[in-house]
Image (spheres, helix red, strand yellow):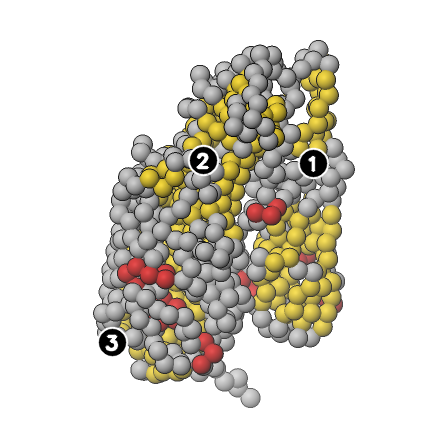
């Protein structure tokens, strides 16, 4: 019998309906203002959304089964209609398509959440491959390519499996609310070498919205020209490498809630010269929580390795109404002449139930130049690792873009330095605590630790230096590790592509971040004051409402022994000084510390549905830790495949069953640790 070829299915002007359970559940607001009516980048939803109990999609061309086309033209001129609507669990491939989408004069949440007016709309749990071609949209709310995962709305929760793989495509959008590639409700997008240009407001080239998802981008150029249109807007996990990112009016990137962005070897440039929504600051990296419901409340993540970060106006980093982990390694940073390196303070948003302006910054082999501003009700935990070299001051005197004072006194600032780290003061500065080792160049200024002021000499194990020259910090170390044993040779194309779709390596959450205090400074309640004329290698004791000034200070005190915590509080270093000669020995008794997380919560077991994927992250507070999967048996692989790339773990259910997955963490100078994850497939 001759095998019958699977039929290609196309339908003109077709429609189907989403069930009541996925209807919009929150109040909707004007689109131009962004999420909750008040996003700085104005990038997420807006307009009034459908008030009915269902969402309806339609497509000028609808594809509902396995299909491959080449050099086809797809066009829609009607409002609320996709040029191409893909709704299937099968694999669809569009080779060199020409997609033109016009029509639509409003841009509400239905467009941003569900993609009802996009050029190409993919849903249904299948894999869509788009290779080459062009996508051009001119209607409002007309995103270029949309990946919709149909989860229940939780940020980055498992979707239905919808994956879009797109490469070598040119995408152009010109109207309001029209992003380049858009991912929502647990969808996955993998993009390679795209050229995306957006002109309208609230139109980030790389864009996510309610429910988040997983986005991986490698190569390409991504340019925005509209108000409230950063190059990247994240409520999801977004991993970008080897790309050029340009924002000519708005922030460079914007992260909301528990979203994350990781950039590796990227060049990011922003010239934020106009504020939008509730925003009152100009900035390049904006991390916040709008309280609109588009992203879960929690810790945001921004990681950048290599490449360059150029801020042409305003502050380079701005954190407000959220906790944010910021991880930098080997990045060439150029600050604007009138902006701070970092501001952490109140802006236009407040979570009255959980007020939080908190930045946790880890700089590894990183040159930093510029001021770190921390508002009176805000906090900064700064860890300077490796050869990090910072030239700048701390202050709590902060004004916004309009010149209005936001803060006049400094909040909590805890600084930890490693052996080769250096801080060069540019003005008088204040910190709550200073710990670790490293070097301080007072440069003629005063550093106040707690309420003890220093103008020269050592502070604990931190020695005075006259060096003002930063080392070559334009390199970084890769912590990616993978196991050839973790993949299955019979994985489908959908499975293999999804392995790269989860968020990139994220630093540990705030609970795992570096210790913010040490024995190097302390405060005790007293109204007395004292003056020290011969400093000690030990920590200085200070008093409230008084100041103790160390004016001479010594380096490491001879014939003494001291023990200090390292920058990440994960290993101990014992330093013995004899006649000013110092010998350092690193303990190997500390174990690699890590957790396996799902949706930012540590788990020891996980359930995977047959044919579906679950994405997890490994979070570790051990510097330089790498991870691999302990070899799986062939029997286990038939139950569920497991793929580990760096700290991103993807499981795919094959058939009903159970097994225990083991992850091993290793790091130089630490005892290796193996943890188990019980995997159940139903």
Q: Residue at x 56, y 16 (%)?
A: 531
| Residue 78: image tag | 3
- What whole-number distance in Å separates the C-alpha atoms at marks 1 and 3? 63 Å
Q: Earlier in the sequence, mark 3 or mark 2?
A: 3
Residue plotted at (58% across, 67% down): 613
Q: Which residue is mark 2?
A: 410
From the viewer's perspective, is the residue at label 3 or at label 2 nearer? Answer: 2
Give above or below for 409 relative to 201: above
Q: Residue at x 56, y 38 (%)?
A: 477
Classify the position of the N terminus by image quarter.
bottom right
Cβ atoms at labels 1 and 3 below 8 Å apart:
no
In the structure shown, which secondary structural element does the residue marked by tag 1 occupy? Answer: loop
Q: Is residue 561 visible?
A: yes
How far separated are the C-alphas under marks 1 and 2?
Answer: 30 Å
Report which quarter residue 284 is drawn in: top left
How packed mark 2 is, by other alpha carbons closer than 10 Å (few <14, some 14-19, many 20 or more), is many
Mark 1 or 3, nearer chain start: 3
The front one of 237 and 483 is 237
Residue on which the image places disc 1: 571
So how many labels did they put on this image?
3
């Amino acid at each position: 019998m001759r095998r019958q070829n699977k039929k290609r299915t196309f339908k003109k002007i077709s429609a189907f309906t989403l069930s009541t359970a996925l209807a919009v559940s929150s109040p909707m607001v004007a689109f131009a203002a962004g999420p909750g009516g008040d996003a700085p980048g104005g990038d997420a939803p807006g307009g009034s959304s459908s008030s009915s109990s269902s969402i309806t999609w339609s497509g000028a061309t609808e594809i509902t089964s396995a299909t491959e086309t080449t050099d086809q033209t797809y066009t829609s001129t009607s409002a609320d209609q996709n040029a191409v609507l893909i709704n299937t669990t099968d694999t669809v491939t569009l080779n060199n398509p020409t997609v033109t989408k016009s029509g639509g004069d409003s841009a509400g949440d239905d467009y941003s959440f569900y993609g009802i007016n996009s050029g190409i709309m993919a849903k249904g749990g299948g894999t869509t491959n788009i290779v080459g071609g062009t996508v051009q949209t001119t209607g409002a709310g007309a995103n270029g390519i949309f990946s919709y995962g149909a989860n229940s709305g939780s940020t980055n929760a498992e979707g239905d499996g919808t994956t879009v793989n797109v490469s070598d495509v040119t995408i152009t959008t010109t109207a309001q609310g029209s992003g380049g590639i858009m991912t929502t409700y647990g969808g996955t997008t993998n993009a390679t070498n795209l050229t995306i240009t957006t002109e309208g407001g609230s139109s980030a080239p790389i864009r996510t919205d309610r429910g988040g998802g997983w986005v991986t981008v490698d190569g390409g150029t991504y340019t925005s020209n509209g108000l409230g249109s950063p190059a990247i807007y994240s409520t999801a996990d977004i991993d970008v490498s080897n790309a050029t990112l340009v924002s000519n009016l708005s922030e460079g990137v914007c992260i909301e809630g528990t979203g994350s962005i990781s950039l590796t070897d990227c060049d990011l440039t922003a010239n934020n010269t106009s504020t939008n929504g509730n925003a009152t600051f100009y900035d390049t990296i904006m991390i916040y929580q709008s309280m609109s419901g588009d992203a879960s409340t929690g810790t945001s993540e921004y990681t950048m390795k290599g490449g360059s970060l150029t801020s042409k106006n305003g502050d380079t980093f701005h954190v407000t109404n959220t906790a944010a982990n910021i991880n930098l390694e080997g990045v060439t940073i150029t600050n604007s002449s009138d902006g701070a390196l970092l501001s952490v303070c109140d802006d236009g948003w407040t979570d009255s139930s959980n007020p939080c302006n908190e930045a946790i910054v880890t700089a590894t082999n990183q040159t930093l130049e510029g001021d770190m501003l921390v508002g009176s009700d805000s906090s900064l935990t700064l860890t300077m690792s490796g050869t990090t070299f910072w030239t700048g001051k701390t202050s709590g005197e902060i004004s916004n873009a309009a010149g209005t004072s936001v803060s006049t006194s400094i909040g909590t600032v805890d600084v930890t330095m490693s052996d080769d780290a250096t801080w060069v003061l540019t003005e008088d500065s204040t910190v709550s605590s200073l710990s670790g080792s490293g070097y301080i160049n007072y440069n003629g200024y005063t550093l106040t630790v707690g309420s003890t002021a220093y103008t020269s000499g050592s502070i604990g194990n931190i020695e005075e230096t006259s060096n003002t020259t930063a080392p070559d910090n334009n390199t970084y170390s890769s912590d990616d590790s993978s196991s050839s044993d973790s993949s299955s040779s019979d994985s489908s194309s959908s499975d293999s592509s999804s392995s790269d779709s989860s968020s990139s390596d994220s630093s540990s959450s705030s609970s795992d971040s570096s210790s913010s205090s040490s024995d190097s400074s302390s405060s005790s309640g007293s109204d007395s004051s004292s003056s020290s004329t011969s400093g000690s290698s030990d920590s200085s004791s200070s008093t409230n409402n008084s100041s103790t000034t160390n004016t001479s200070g010594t380096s490491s005190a001879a014939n003494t022994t001291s023990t200090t915590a390292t920058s990440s509080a994960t290993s101990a270093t014992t330093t013995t000084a004899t006649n000013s000669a110092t010998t350092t020995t690193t303990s190997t008794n500390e174990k690699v510390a890590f957790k396996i997380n799902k949706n930012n919560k540590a788990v020891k077991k996980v359930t995977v549905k047959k044919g579906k994927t679950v994405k997890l992250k490994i979070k570790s507070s051990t510097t330089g830790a790498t991870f691999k999967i302990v070899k799986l048996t062939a029997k286990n692989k038939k139950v569920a495949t497991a793929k580990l790339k760096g700290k991103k773990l993807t499981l795919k259910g094959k058939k009903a069953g159970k097994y225990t997955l083991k992850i091993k963490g290793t790091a130089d100078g630490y005892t290796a640790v193996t943890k188990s994850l019980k995997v159940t497939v139903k």
